[in-house]
Amino acid sequence: MRGRILVVDDEPLKRITLQIELSEHGFEVYEAADALTARRIFESQPIDVVVSDVRMPGMNGLELLAALKQIRPEVEVILMTAYATVDTAVLAIKRGAYDYITKPFTTQELLAKLDRLFATRTPLEADTQVETLGRLVARSASMKRLFAQLRAVADTDRTILLCGESGTGKELFAEAIHQLSRRADKPFIRFSCAALQPTVLESELFGHAKGAFTGAHRQKAGRFELADGGTILLDEVDDIPTDLQVKLLRVVEQQEFERVGGEDPVRVDVRLICATKSDLLQLVKEGRFREDLYYRLNVISLCIPPLRERPEDIPVLAGHFLKKHAALVGDAQVSISPHALDELMRHTWPGNVRELEHVLERALAFCGGKEIRPEHVLPLGRWTTEPPPPAGLELTELSKLGLTETVADIERRLILMALRQCNGNQARAAQKLGIPRTTLRDKMAKYNIPVS
């Protein structure tokens, strides 16, 4: 790979064409239709060069240039414009652009600028060091920052609110906090508040007295009593009914409560960690979560990024899970083929780290103790909703070719790129393109693509 390029252009045809042609010349190419999308990609991917249009809706190319330079000033930017003037060029260079290129231009013209840029550019030192925290592993900058924040607050008794999508590892974060705290030799109690009847939930959390209800033949300690001196994790805290939230608020404020059916207060010394996949502030606005409890829980808030926003962690996590589940193949040393890893990197991971672990477990079961190949990890699930259609595509944006010829040219290039990435393997190329193998063969014959 020659480098990572981010192409930003609101013209879909130009954007897709550049992605295809730059990929064919050895670059890893990301694309964005607007500046906001570009910033999200830029902050989550190790981009080397940004190629951006000047005139875009919302934030224009010059404004995007300034924003990107504030984030990572070492990354170079090339601006594209159909309205080039000396003033525009001078302004772009003054704001830190490496160069500009006038539309319309050929890919070869852009490649010449990229070749000069990479020839004179000192390679950036990528942070490839893997960091561990308890049972957590990461390479991404976002997770390393989170690890640092966690270490800074772990040895206090402050309440912590862990936010993040399902499957991001909130329980492992809570476990790491407990292990780094002065309470590490005391109990660590995990409890999920999801899908329990209010009476059952109250009894589980606070215990009950003998005779409190039918079947209560003896006094029972709740989770808070069991965690006395240590730490309790309340997962899915957003599912606690509003009536019980009052009792939880008292525990947070006074460290005491009454058992169900009991009258004597029970005092405990517990460090509280709560986890939620929902926006608690939005639930407060909807009247489904007490505002006073929200501010008591939100003393220190740590947000865990989803896996799709930190893809550099995928190879690290994959290797970690292979070691963790090595017993499935008799502790054999199993590797992941480059093509299988490519499939993992392309997936959006709606189930986050939990989904990745399950995929690797399944792959180990199918690979027979040898190398994990694409067929062992496929099929990977997809988002259930369709991506939004490209915005702003007009007939004036098409090339001088007709619509049929333009679509055919793009389709042919995509097929060639998929075959190249799959080393000519038609089955894998068809999977990558999302079409049946027979359809791929028909299209290869239609476009006179030779069979390798």
Image (cartoon, grey):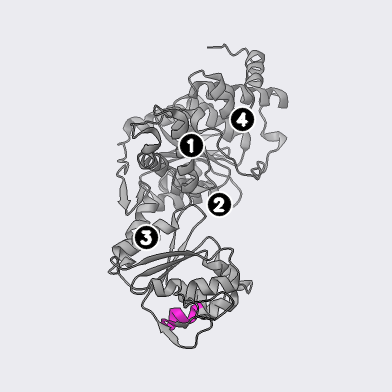
Q: Nearer the viewer, mark 3 or mark 4?
A: 3
Judged from the image, the secondary structure of the residue bearing numbered disc 4 is loop
The boundaries of the magenta stretch are 248-256
Residue at (37% x, 50% y) in the render: 141
> Is 250 one of the magenta-colored residues?
yes
> Is 131 one of the magenta-colored residues?
no
Which residue, given by chain and number where applicable, does mark 2 sit on? 59
Which residue, given by chain and number where applicable, does mark 3 sit on? 175
Q: Amino acid at mark 1?
A: Arg
* Mark 1 burial class by Cα count in 10 Å: few <14, some 14-19, many 20+: some
In-image side of 368 versus 202 (left or right): left
Percent from the top left, x then y, of residue 106?
Answer: 53, 26
How far apart in space, not on screen, are marks 2 and 4 (Cα)?
A: 34 Å
Ranked by sequence position, the earlier of labels 2 and 1 is 2
SS assignment for the magenta stretch, majority: helix
Percent from the top left, x then y, of residue 77?
Answer: 44, 41
Q: Nearer the viewer, mark 3 or mark 1?
A: 1
Residue at (52% x, 55% y) in the render: 165
How far apart in space, not on screen, are marks 2 and 1 (Cα)?
A: 44 Å
Q: Amino acid at mark 2?
A: Met
Q: Nearer the viewer, mark 4 or mark 1?
A: 1
Q: Nearer the viewer, mark 2 or mark 1?
A: 1
Q: Nearer the viewer, mark 2 or mark 4?
A: 4
Q: Amino acid at mark 4?
A: Gly
Q: Amino acid at mark 3?
A: Glu
Task: Say whether marks 3 and 4 touch (CB < 8 Å).
Answer: no
Which residue, given by chain and number where applicable, does mark 1 sit on? 362
Ranked by sequence position, the earlier of labels 4 and 1 is 1
* Mark 2 burial class by Cα count in 10 Å: few <14, some 14-19, many 20+: some
Which residue, given by chain and number where applicable, does mark 4 sit on? 434
Relative to residue 202, is residue 322 depicted above or below?
Answer: above
Residue at (44% x, 86% y) in the render: 265
